[in-house]
Amino acid sequence: MPLPPKELYTISEIANRWNVQSDTIKDFMLTQKLQASIFLPSKMLLKFTLQFNHQCAEDDDDPYIYDVDYADPDSFRSRQGLFELDYHDIEWDENGFAKLEKGEMFLKLPGEDGYFGFHETYVLKQDDVLISLPEVTRFEEEYGITFNDMALQASSPNEFEPASFVEFSSDSTVPKSLQYQKDNIENDKDQINPKRETTLLTIIAVLLEIISGEFTSYEVLKHPSIRNQEDLINKMTELETRGLGERNLQEIFALAKRTKSRN
C-alpha cells in the first residue's frame, strides 16, 4: 500500500512539480492565484475582528474597523498550527526575510472571520512559506495540470516528482503546467507589481475618505447619495460584477486603509 502524500510543500517543491522556476510560484502567490501558508509553533497572537469604532461613527464613516477585543480571551492567546498567509502584502528583503511587526494583520484561518497578527515582531523566512496539499490540488484542477500518477507512486510516493512526469499537451511541447502561462502571456504582462498595488490601494483609501466627507478642509463635499462605507458597498454589490462581493469589498477597503496608514 502506498504511503499517503505529504500535506505541506515548500515553494521549491511545487516549482519542481510544475516544472517552473521558484519565482513563478512566488508570482502566483503575489497575484493571489495560489494561497500561501505558514506553520507556526506556539506563538502569542492577536485576533482582529470587526469592532464598532465611536470615532468613525462620529465622522460618519463606516463605524466598524478591524481591531482587537481585549475583553475576549480568544483575541489574545497562544496559538499554533497552519495559517493562511497574506503573501501579497509582505515586503521581503534581498535575503528572503520579512519582519512582521506587532499588530500587522498577515494571517488568517480558513473559514474563520477576521485576521491574526503577532504580539511581538516575527521574522519570517521565505523558505518557511508553504503550500498545502488541498491548495495544490485546487490549483492543478483549475488550470488543468495533470501528472503520471502511477509513475509518481512507483518512484517516490511521499515526495513530488521532477518535471519528467509532467504530462505534455497533445498539440505542444509545452507542459500543461505552463500552458496557462503560454495562452495568457499578454495578460501576464499587465500584472500589477507590488509598488503599483500599494499606490492603487492608497488611492482607494483616499477615495473612501473623499466619499465619506473627511476632506471638508479641502472644500471637497461628501457624496450626497452615499451615507457611509456600508452604503457604498451595498450599492457596488448591486452591480453584480465579478469580484465586487460584500466580503471581498470589505477586505479590500480594510487593506487599503491599512496600506495608507503605513505610508
Image: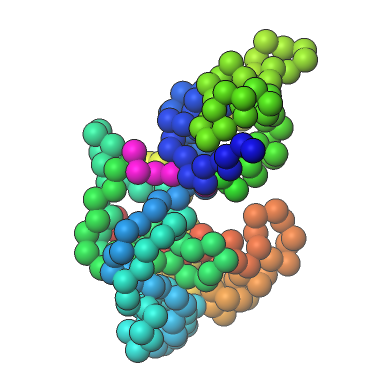
- Looking at the rendering, in which quadrant would you find the C terminus? bottom left
Q: Position of residue 192 (x, y in %)?
A: 49, 38
Q: Position of residue 69 (x, y in %)?
A: 37, 83
- Looking at the rendering, in which quadrant would you find the N terminus? top right
In the displayed structure, 63 sits above or below 155; it is: below
Q: What residue sits 37% from the left and 63% below the top?
A: 80
Is 181 contained in the magenta span? no
Q: What residue sits 43% from the left and 38% below the top?
A: 10
Q: What residue sits 24% from the left and 50% below the top?
A: 123
Magenta range: 127-132
Q: Nearer the viewer, residue 87 or 176?
A: 176
Q: What residue sits 74% from the left and 60% below the top?
A: 240
Residue located farthest toward the front when viewing the structure as drawn: 1
The answer to whether 24 appears left or right of 106 in the picture is right
Q: Position of residue 222 (x, y in %)?
A: 50, 74
Residue located farthest toward the right when viewing the structure as drawn: 170
The answer to whether 93 appears left or right of 19 in the picture is left
Is 130 contained in the magenta span? yes
Residue 124 seen by the camera: yes
The answer to whether 1 appears left or right of 14 in the picture is right
Q: Position of residue 211 (x, y in %)?
A: 51, 69
Residue 218 seen by the camera: no
In the displayed structure, 32 sits above or below 70; it is: above
